[in-house]
Image (cartoon, grey):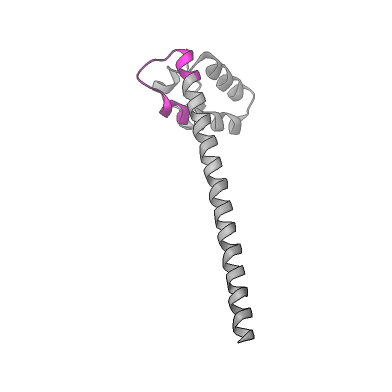
């Protein structure tokens, strides 16, 4: 199937285009046809990321499905890690403030 030229300018090469599942091809063509450039560019970025998860040279849809599940799982893990890091940083700030206040109170009473 022929790839719309706009997709090349947005980072989708012929090699990846030729391995995309039918649903992705259909969506990208529709996005180009309806002028939804940003949506197409976002989808291409996602497809490139998912392609990094793929194993071997299989191109069937089940392989894309497995890769997309792995990609989603990876994004979820990163989001959880970011939340945990933010919580730990907040706890550290609260602890530092409490310790500072305790030290100031102790110094004032001495």
- Quarter of image, res 102: bottom right
Residue 54 within the magenta-colored segment of the rendering: yes
Magenta range: 48-65
Identify the residue at horizontal 58%, vertical 20% (top origin): 27
Task: Answer above or below: position of 67 versus 93.
Answer: above
Quadrant placement of the C terminus: bottom right
Identify the residue at horizontal 48%, vertical 27% (top origin): 70
In the foreground, 5 or 16: 16
Task: Estimate the x, y position of residue 89 in percent, counting from the top left.
Answer: 55, 57
Tally of marks: 0
Task: Estimate the x, y position of residue 79 in percent, counting from the top left.
Answer: 55, 41
Task: Estimate the x, y position of residue 103 in percent, counting from the top left.
Answer: 58, 77
Identify the residue at horizontal 53%, vertical 18% (top origin): 25
Q: Residue furthest front?
A: 110
Task: Estimate the x, y position of residue 40 in percent, counting from the top left.
Answer: 57, 28
In the foreground, 12 or 50: 50
In the foreground, 104 or 11: 104
In the foreground, 56 or 3: 56
Relative to residue 7, is residue 27 drawn left or right?
Answer: right
Residue 93 within the magenta-colored segment of the rendering: no
Q: Residue furthest left?
A: 56
- Quarter of image, res 104: bottom right
Task: Answer above or below: position of 102 versus 60.
Answer: below
Q: Residue furthest bottom?
A: 110
Identify the residue at horizontal 43%, vertical 17% (top origin): 19
Relative to residue 26, is residue 55 drawn left or right?
Answer: left
- From the image, give the main secondary structure of the stretch colored magenta: helix
């Amino acid at each position: 199937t022929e790839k719309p030229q706009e997709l090349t300018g947005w980072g989708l090469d012929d090699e990846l285009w030729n391995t995309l599942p039918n649903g992705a091809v259909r969506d990208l063509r529709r996005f180009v046809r309806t002028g939804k450039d940003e949506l197409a560019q976002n989808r291409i970025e996602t497809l490139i990321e998912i392609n990094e998860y793929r194993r071997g040279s299989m191109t069937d849809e089940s392989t894309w499905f497995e890769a997309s599940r792995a990609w989603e799982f990876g994004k979820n893990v990163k989001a959880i890690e970011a939340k945990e890091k933010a919580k730990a940083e907040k706890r550290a700030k609260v602890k530092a403030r409490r310790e500072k206040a305790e030290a100031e109170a102790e110094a004032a009473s001495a």
